[in-house]
Image (spheres, rainbow, N blue to C red):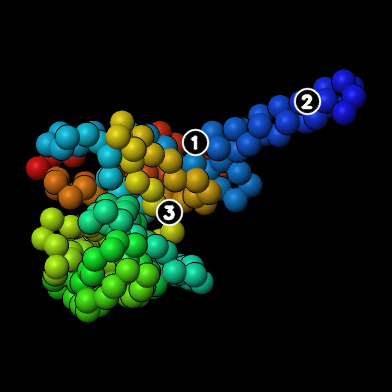
């Protein structure tokens, strides 16, 4: 490859990276990014809070065509918290050498997938909004949460509490925050085209 061609590729890569960064920070033609931070006062860190837009009157959204995976590896559900759109089919593969039994005691979505071995996968459709506790009948130490939302505009926080919800259309919404160790919180927001919105939540028990 000639030096001139390498330089051209480097320039094109830089331009593309700059363009992608601009989209992430300022939103795209499809909407705007809601970003910010959640502080969870009574938890070890700020990870696994779910931020989502409440139901939008007059609008419905189709769940993904393919299942979303909530894995079982080393006696752990991965991820620990999984936000999904109502109607989403969730896959529970067993990648451990031992058998698992996935179930939920939560009233809005009680289910029991039975006991199954390594390599097998069971499925469940989460069609009612709200947080659902997921457990294993065989291993009491295993737990996870599926947070079912009525819009596809959701995100989970990292350990620092940061999150970003891209491609949100302009409008007035109720933004909610949930964490397993805290009381939920909400705020009214206005999303404007091309104007990133920064929000802060503080969650307490």
Label whose residue precedes the other's in the sequence (1 or 2): 2
Q: Quadrant of the C terminus?
A: top left
Q: Give the structural element (helix, strand or loop) at label 3.
A: loop
Q: Nearer the viewer, residue 163 or 82?
A: 82
Q: Position of residue 151 (x, y in %)?
A: 41, 61
Q: Position of residue 111 (x, y in %)?
A: 21, 77
Q: Position of residue 30 (x, y in %)?
A: 60, 51
Residue under circle 1? 196
Residue drawn at the location 71% of the way across and 27% of the way down? 14
Sort mark 2 into few (<14), some (14-19) or many (20+) by Cα contacts within 10 Å.
Answer: few
Find numbered disc 1 in the image and state the secondary structure of the residue it sits on: loop
For the residues labelled 2 and 3, say whether their Cβ atoms are less than 8 Å apart: no
In space, the residues marked 1 and 3 are separated at their CA atoms by 14 Å
Say whether residue 200 is visible.
no
| Residue occupying the far front of the picture | 97
Query: How many C-alpha atoms fall within 10 Å of the one at disc 1: few (<14), some, or many (≥20)?
Result: some
Task: Tell me if residue 50 can be seen.
Answer: yes
Residue 36 percent coordinates (x, y): 37, 34
Q: Residue at x 44, y 45 (%)?
A: 165
The residue that disc 2 covers is 11
Q: Nearer the viewer, mark 1 or mark 3?
A: 3
Q: Residue at x 19, y 36 (%)?
A: 40
- Element marked by disc 2: helix
User: Residue at left 18%, top 57%?
Assistant: 142
Going from N to C along the chain, the mark reached first, 1 or 3, is 3
Q: CA distance from mark 1 to mark 2?
A: 27 Å
């Amino acid at each position: 490859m000639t030096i001139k061609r390498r330089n051209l590729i480097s320039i094109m890569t830089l331009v593309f990276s700059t363009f992608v960064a601009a989209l992430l920070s300022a939103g795209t033609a499809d909407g705007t990014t809601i970003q910010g931070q959640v502080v969870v006062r009574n938890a070890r860190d700020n990870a696994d809070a779910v931020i989502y837009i409440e139901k939008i009157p007059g609008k419905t959204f189709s769940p993904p065509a393919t299942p979303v995976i909530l894995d079982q590896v080393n006696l752990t559900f991965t991820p620990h918290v999984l936000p999904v759109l109502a109607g989403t089919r969730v896959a529970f593969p067993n990648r451990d050498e031992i058998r698992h039994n996935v179930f939920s005691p939560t009233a809005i979505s009680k289910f029991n997938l039975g006991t199954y071995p390594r390599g097998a996968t069971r499925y469940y459709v989460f069609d009612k909004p709200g947080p659902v506790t997921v457990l294993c009948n065989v291993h009491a130490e295993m737990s996870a949460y599926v947070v079912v939302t009525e819009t596809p505009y959701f995100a989970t926080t990292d350990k620092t509490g940061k999150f970003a919800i891209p491609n949100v259309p302009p409008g007035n919404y109720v933004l909610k925050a949930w964490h397993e160790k805290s009381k939920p919180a909400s705020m009214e927001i206005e999303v404007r085209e091309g104007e990133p919105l920064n929000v802060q939540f503080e969650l307490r028990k």
